[in-house]
Amino acid sequence: MPELRLVIFDVDGTLVDGQGLIVASMNAAFSAVGLEAPSRKDILGIVGLSLEHALERLAPSGADHAAMLAAYRAHYFESRSRDGTPATSPLFPKVREVLDRLAADPWTMLAVATGKSKRGLDALIEGHGLEGVFSSLQCADFHPSKPHPSMIEAALGEAGVDKSRTVMVGDTSFDIDMARSAGVKSIAVSWGYHDASQLGADAVIDGFEALPQTIERLLEK
């Protein structure tokens, strides 16, 4: 009889391309306190961290981080409310098709581990009609920031799946380092915000359609 397996996904840069909204919201956060915003490359380099940790890395220590946090969130949610989730955070090609295929397998459980807030994650799932696809939703509101393994450990506990049957799918060093810290396999996607070839993941995929076969290869060893 097959064993249960768990596939945990990062969100931004892995499932959805929210870079335009993220950069614009970060620019609004810096503008709110009269600071020059970092480069697009630097902003995308911190995607995956919880917002508080991201601001601590990008902004000077004396900056009003609370005001920046409020400005970021206001711009982010106002933009998404106005333009809609599919426009501001579109799914990457083949994501919905492959998620549905994996979710239809009775021996595969899906989870999310993201630096997003619960509010942001809930709105994204609703906006893309992904309700019921994931068995476990882990977000920044209840865990230390990546790469701490807390999110993966919580997903493992909720799913009741062994580490040896679990894989983390992400696009940044924070995702892959988190997987390593938790003792699970990792798959890096090449279309995300960090250079996948430099992450040290157990596998790298260049298209989402390659994910099922890659999961099989890693977890059936």
Image (cartoon, grey):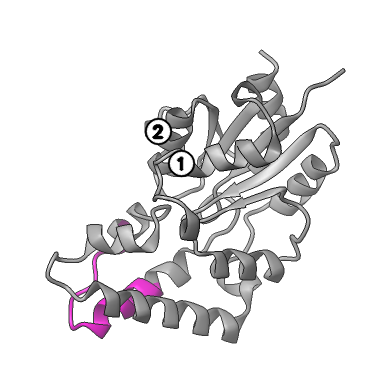
User: In the image as oriented, which residue stretches furthest toward the left?
Assistant: 62
Is the residue 31 above or below the residue 123 in the image?
below
The secondary structure making up most of the magenta span is: helix
Please state, as top left, top right, bottom left or bottom right, where the C terminus lies in the image: top right
Residue type, mark 2 in image: Leu
Verify CB contact (< 8 Å) between mark 2 and mark 1. Answer: no
- The answer to if 38 sits in the magenta stretch is yes
Ranked by sequence position, the earlier of labels 2 and 1 is: 1
Magenta span of residues: 24-41
Real-space Cα distance between discs 2 and 1?
9 Å
Q: Nearer the viewer, mark 2 or mark 1?
A: 1
Is the residue 80 above or below the residue 207 in the image?
below
Image point (59%, 25%), residue name = 163
Label tally: 2
Image point (63%, 29%), residue name = 166
Q: Is residue 108 left or right of residue 181?
A: right
Q: Looking at the picture, tell me which residue is in the foreground, 10 or 147.
A: 147
Image point (47%, 57%), residue name = 140
Q: Position of residue 63 (x, y in %)?
A: 16, 73
Q: Looking at the picture, tell me which residue is in the foreground, 192 or 127.
A: 127
Residue corresponding to mark 2 = 199
Report helix, strand or loop for mark 2. loop
Asked which quadrant contains residue 158, the reply is top right
Q: Is residue 156 left or right of residue 133?
A: left
For residue 175, the mark is: 1
Classify 10 Å Cα crowding around label 1: few (below 14), some (14-19), many (20 and above): many
Image point (50%, 64%), residue name = 117
Residue type, mark 1 in image: Asp
Q: Position of residue 52 (x, y in %)?
A: 33, 63
